Image (cartoon, helix red, strand yellow):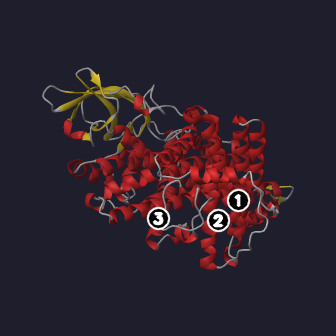
Amino acid sequence: MIGTEPKASIKGGEFLIKETDASQVFIPEEFTEEQQMIAATCREFLEREIWPRLNEIDNAKSPELISSLMDKAGELGLLGTSVPEQYGGFGTNFNTSMLVAETTGAGHSFSVALSAHTGIGTLPIVYYGNEDQKSTYLPKLASGEWKAAYCLTEPDSGSDANSGKTKAVLTDDGKYYVLNGQKMWITNGGFADIYIVFAKIDEGGQTDKNLSAFIVERGYEGITMNEPEHKMGIKGSDTRQIFFNDVKVPVENLLSDRGNGFKIAVNILNIGRIKLGIAAIGGSKEVINNAIRYSNERKQFKTPISQFGAIKHKLAEMALKVYASETASYRAGQNIDDLIEDLKAEGIEDGAAKLKALEQFAIECAIMKVHGSEVLDYVVDEGVQIYGGMGYSADAPMDRSYRDARINRIFEGTNEINRMLIVDMLLKRAMKGELDLMTPAMAVAKEIMSIPDFNSEEEEGIFIAEKKVLKNLKKAALMVSGAAVQKFMMTLSDEQEILMNVADMAIEIYAAESVLLRVEKLIGIKGEEAVALQKQMALVYLHEAVEKVNNAGRAAITSFAEGDELRGMLMGLKRFTKIEPMNLKDARRQIADAIISENKYIF
């Protein structure tokens, strides 16, 4: 059965089989004054340098404007938050870097350039560089003197990154690797000073199976590029195809070990995924603010449209989805920070501890990438609808927000790939004995064949009934995934639709539990009356999660079960997705009224 005792040590993926105590989670209300000042600096930078120039950025004919804005961000230290202090950065913890990503996430094209530089462009050297590489490149990257880009994707190598054809051949004197190949969709490509390039080493006509990574300086001969790509959105970000033609790279610029490039790519993508998710929430909050202001200003039938129930429903849904995604992101971020500290206390070096912690919570990173990007898409779509005809006009802010949002479901691995990764990683950990999924799954299978116990003792505390609902939702996910594993065994990877159904169940469970834990912790700090609205948000989100888990579970079950098994599993799903009804309309109206009266997102 699902465990009930909280554990001091939390591992990635355990949320599906164990309960978490509210005291174990970090909530955004706990950010320190220093962290809040960092966020304020980011907001002020957007207000002063970015938002007044959004049209200019999108219509720029060269990358010079974005590059100059990056220089200004570097002067404020915004490019060095994740770079260790000894190399000119601030060396902040992971959740602080998440806060920076969230706040700057409202910067449209600029935020894409910023995150590409500070994340996938800089972090490979932070985590995998040797001392010479770190001391040579990190100070320049932290200050903004040099800009970075990440060259992984190729015309025939996207989600299947390890199939890249770019090759590196060692020269006869052993001093250089000669790079030849083509990369595409390279953000910051037109102005970057260094490129993290992935290629397979070819020696004696034999090409390595796995990628290696190289630090390539822009000044090396043989680098050419196309003109910037014309894109649906994020038009101000410089995106190019880059060609490497007999580019001689010093052997000392091999990053980490030969053949370790794929591992570097995967681990850096873990960071990129969760930071993309939280950046999407930063963008979502700005869209909500615009939508609230417009709905208060726009009158129809002599009444602000914010007073209409249909608009209140939209605003409330936008707010509670953002609240849930923000909450779950910082929960995962703190889990990563806590594990880093635990590993360092065991004597593991800082960089290795960070990599191991990020790998441990790769499941949650993928979850938050999917959740955050899809929340943003929901928010911008409803934002356009609230603006009505003006939402479709390029003179109103929703046009840019709508177009810019769409890329996030593709960036850092498509949401389909990430959904399949979530389940794949869970099952692989189970097979390795790192995560005991089968024992609780078998217990749940046995439970659905038994008579329900209607005589459970009354418990006291906050969210007792809701926690029972969550526990049952986890049972539903375990039931479906366990049955699917037994049915398909080694061919389960071919059943992508079912994998995505199971992933959707896990995503909603993680988000709903995170919100309950946040509000429970808030109640303990401020008292129930002070967080009545947040409580309503948690309850509404849980009700919606129950419906989504039920729908995803039913879609999966009917994809592979038949006869008595089908009927039994559907009966079990019905049992595990029950929740006491509440007046969701009134709850949403309370949430909407609060943000409408304040004319902004307030949570």
Q: Position of residue 466 (x, y in %)?
A: 71, 65
Residue most extreme to the top: 205
Q: CA distance from mark 3 to mark 2?
A: 20 Å
Residue 568 picture quarter? top right
Rendered position, 244 above or below 234: above
Residue identified by numbered label 2: 516
Q: Position of residue 259 (x, y in %)?
A: 31, 36
| Left or right: 429, with 377 as reference point | left
* Dot 2 and dot 1 residues touching (CB under 8 Å): yes
Mark 1 residue crowding within 10 angstroms, few (<14) / some (14–19) / many (20+): many
Identify the secondary structure beneath mark 1.
helix
Identify the secondary structure beneath mark 2.
helix
The number of discs equals: 3
Viewer-closest of 62 and 186 = 186
| Left or right: 204, with 412 as reference point | left
Q: Position of residue 67 (x, y in %)?
A: 39, 45
Which residue type carries mark 2?
Answer: Leu
* Dot 3 and dot 2 residues touching (CB under 8 Å): no
| Left or right: 351, with 61 as reference point | left
Residue 329 picture quarter? bottom right
Rendered position, 246 above or below 340: above
Residue identified by numbered label 3: 9
Residue identified by numbered label 1: 542
